[in-house]
Image (cartoon, grey):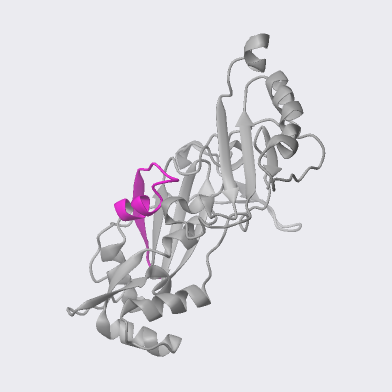
Amino acid sequence: MLFQQRGIRDFSSTHMEALGAEASYGKNSQARKSREVLLRLVVEHKSREALELFAGEIGSVGLGCAPGTTGIYGGRPRPTPVIRLFTFFLDKSEVGQPVITINDGPKTAITIPPGTDDVALDQKNVQGDQDVPDEPTVDVPLGLLAYARSGDKGDTSNIAIIARRPWYLPLLRRELTPDRIVRQLAHLVSGPAVRFEAPGLHALNFVIENALGGGGMASLRIDPQGKAYGQMTLEIMIATPQSWVRDLHHQTGTSQEGASAPISAAFAKNAPRQTEGCAKSRSNHAPWEFFSS
């Protein structure tokens, strides 16, 4: 109503997250019954006037909402610019040859390597891979078989999956397709995704486009750089040969009875979930943010 009276268009974007209810996990959240959450509300508009108007009105939330609602205020929220990263490829041949000087030594021109083709996605028997045993399997979390590290470039996320044992790599290569990674994060990413090998590291690297709501300073999310994506990916259940699972039970000190349940519990105990806010407790990169519990 206030916008209509002033001839102001609606927000170009809004975003809400209930921190404490694993909002960033989407359908995979395990904390929907949380009795205490922190509401994170972000709005975006081309007009600073619209944001100032909303900032002036939002204070009534603490007074007029449901009983038990309180607010965290550091003064009235202030609009901040939205800055978007523009990333592009530039052919190495177009870049001038760099010249360096060490201390008082002579100037030395550095030759830029031309690079090589991408490593094939479906290599077999590379890095001394061993065959995956042909035997019954048990589902275990990926976190028992691999480490993960995720990061960003603009609106593109990359997730590195590093096998805990070299002989796990063929299994990971078979089970972890780009499509499966996108499905795991479907509430956050659109894709497409591409998988790359990391020779010598027993690792796979997944590059996912349209993954971060704009990414970096342009994203309205609590995790604009996808730092928690790696941890979310480690919850994928992997059909693992029984002999390997017996070894995992021995390593974690759990009973083999109950198949994947004890080992899943061991994973949960040893590698707790990364919750919202761990990657970034508060971002000032959006137009403005308002926090209320």
Residue 73 pos. (x, y %): 78, 42
Q: Left or right: 289 with respect to 184? A: right
- Identify which residue is drawn at 57% across, 57% down: 34
Q: Left or right: 232 with respect to 222? A: left
Q: Give the range drawn in magenta.
A: 179-200
Nearest the camera: 56 or 198? Answer: 56
Which corner quadrant of the image does residue 64 belong to?
top right
Residue 61 pos. (x, y %): 70, 36
Residue 182 pos. (x, y %): 36, 50
Q: Left or right: 99 with respect to 236? A: right
Q: Left or right: 191 with respect to 156? A: left
- Identify which residue is drawn at 26% across, 82% down: 242
Q: Does the magenta stretch include residue 268?
A: no
- Up the image or down, 163 lies above or below 197; here it is below
Nearest the camera: 2 or 16? Answer: 2
- Up the image or down, 4 lies above or below 143; here it is above
- Identify which residue is drawn at 30% across, 83% down: 244
Farthest left residue?
A: 134
Residue 178 pos. (x, y %): 32, 53
Q: Is residue 117 visible?
A: no
Count of numbered tags: 0
Which corner quadrant of the image does residue 122 belong to?
bottom left
Farthest right residue?
A: 75
- Up the image or down, 83 lies above or below 4; here it is below
Which corner quadrant of the image does residue 195 belong to?
bottom left
Q: Can residue 32 be seen in this view?
A: yes
Q: Does the magenta stretch include residue 189?
A: yes
Of the 4 image quadrants, the one containing the N terminus is top right
